[in-house]
Amino acid sequence: MVRSALVASQLIAAAAAVRPFVNEPDTGLQDFLFSTNYTEGTLPPLRDMRGLPDFDYAARQVLDGQMYSFYRTAAAGEWSYRNNLEIWEKVKFRPHQLAGHEGLNETMGVSILGYNFSAPFFISPATRAAYGDPERAEINFVDAAAEADILYVSALYASKSIEEIGEAKRAHNNTLNGPQVTFQQIYSNANLSVTWDAIARAEAQNAKAIVWTIDAPGSSTRHRAARYDTTNANSVTSYLTWDLYEEMKNHTTLPIILKGITTVEDALTAVERGVPAIWLSNHGARQVDHSPSPLEIAYEIYRNAPQVFSQVEVLADSGVRYGSDVLKLLALGVKAVGLGRPFMYSNVYGLEGPQKVIEILKSEILQDAAQIGITDLSNIDPKRLNMRALESTVYLAEE
Ligand SMILES: Cc1cc2nc3c(=O)[nH]c(=O)nc-3n(C[C@H](O)[C@H](O)[C@H](O)COP(=O)(O)O)c2cc1C
Ligand SMILES: *[C@@H]1O[C@H](CO)[C@@H](O)[C@H](O)[C@H]1NC(C)=O
Ligand SMILES: *[C@@H]1O[C@H](CO)[C@@H](O)[C@H](O)[C@H]1NC(C)=O
Ligand SMILES: *[C@@H]1O[C@H](CO)[C@@H](O)[C@H](O)[C@H]1NC(C)=O
Ligand SMILES: *[C@@H]1O[C@H](CO)[C@@H](O)[C@H](O)[C@H]1NC(C)=O
Ligand SMILES: *[C@@H]1O[C@H](CO)[C@@H](O)[C@H](O)[C@H]1NC(C)=O
Ligand SMILES: *[C@@H]1O[C@H](CO)[C@@H](O)[C@H](O)[C@H]1NC(C)=O
């Protein structure tokens, strides 16, 4: 009796301890703003943006419901969206003390397909940047990326055309690569001549790689956006097959990166087929609910086929918000990590928004790496991570 009462009370306590999901963990942003002359519904001062989640709050104050919900939306019950943000806490660091970190800052650079960048993160392709900045839209991303020497991957359905982005890019000739390097994301269209045309336009604007989004065979279920009758940017159904990949190679000399790999099997097939780079992603949880986060995908590959990380360049995105998130993916073997929403939200500040996102993330990566005893960002020992909590969910091929 006593025992079962105890168990019951423990269960109740455990249930009460489950914390509700918070879109932006409370680190005092609102308390602080309301202690100043800040008026809700207006854009908070940029100087008060101290972390990437702060930009979500800021964008929500000034974008109308339709626009904000388009950026924020995810598939169905948004369980994957929440998982993308919450999964990171499952992997704990094992900080290694007295390791020294002299020269750490010199190891932040990364090469992606032979191009040099100053940091292991980049701007993921996302449509409709004009919601944030009606005039400059994606041009802010082009400029901020060039100035900070990070990669920008422009979206096929960006507010600015491939040609306008190309023109903005030509203003930047003094990056680590000389002229600015960008990659172009595409969706394939059921009418393939539309697809070949998009690739030709990207080549004409000197994009250095094609990022083919393979996780969007058609519209997806998005309740939050549907309330405003907002449709997916990509609603053209096309048949996504490995044959189409082979055919696409005949239509471009550029490397084709596959964006949207979510399993070890598909990663291995990509390696077999000589794909130069794969991009682990659940599309910011916008395509199908209960799709895995990049941490889970990277861990599945790490456990089943760790050689993949040296056979092909591995990029990843979805749910990255902190320097420590970046470090966890790098430790598993990911080369560079993309961010979508934080950049889109930050664009409500114009150019200074994405600039600040980059500055914050660079500084968090360096500070956190030093705390953890990482001495070389390009070669992080996976032993810096305790991944036991992922163990119960990982798919193991031999089972
Ligand atoms: C508003 C918005 C539009 C997007 N549009 C595209 C797109 O056109 N093509 C694409 O491949 N991915 C698109 N994505 C997905 C991003 O490339 C990226 O995978 C995702 O945003 C990463 O998750 P995060 O937002 O949590 O960082 C979009 C994401 C957002 C938020
Ligand atoms: C609000 O306070 C900040 C300094 O905290 C000041 O720069 C700004 O001008 C003030 N704004 C208004 C509308 O009073
Ligand atoms: C790294 O830090 C050292 C010492 O603070 C500094 O001299 C050097 O310029 C920094 N290098 C980079 C790439 O920031
Ligand atoms: C940058 O270089 C390109 C090609 O070499 C040239 O067309 C363009 O005018 C240059 N831009 C600037 C701002 O110098
Ligand atoms: C990248 O950096 C390496 C080493 O500094 C250099 O050899 C290479 O030429 C650079 N690549 C480009 C595309 O600038
Ligand atoms: C396919 O797209 C091209 C434009 O690239 C257009 O000329 C053609 O009519 C389209 N074909 C069909 C069947 O819609
Ligand atoms: C690609 O081009 C090669 C050589 O031109 C040809 O043999 C092959 O059938 C083409 N493949 C596809 C899938 O179109």
Image: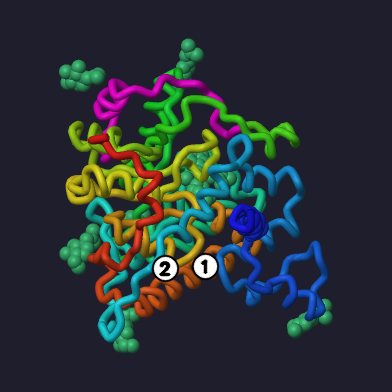
Q: Amino acid at mark 2?
A: Ala
What residue sits 78% from the left and 65% below the top?
A: 42
Tell me the crowding category of disc 2: few under 14, some 14 to 19, or many 20 or more residues within 10 angstroms, Cα based: some
Q: In the figure, residue 41 lies in which quadrant?
A: bottom right
In the image shown, does 141 or 26 lie closer to the viewer?
A: 26
Find residue 266 and report its horizontal and vertical position in percent: 30, 33
Q: Quadrant of the C terminus?
A: top left
Find residue 262 and report its horizontal and vertical position in percent: 38, 38
Assign the magenta stretch its main secondary structure.
Answer: loop
Q: Is residue 236 magenta?
A: yes
Q: Point out the tag, 1 or 2, that comes first from the N-terminus.
A: 2
Find residue 75 and report its horizontal and vertical position in percent: 59, 37
Residue 377, placed above or below residue 226: below
Residue 199, placed above or below residue 103: above
Give the residues drawn in magenta, as a range.
232-255
Residue assigned mark 1: 355
What residue sits 43% from the left and 61% below the top?
A: 325
Residue assigned mark 2: 148
Find residue 198 and report its horizontal and vertical position in percent: 42, 32
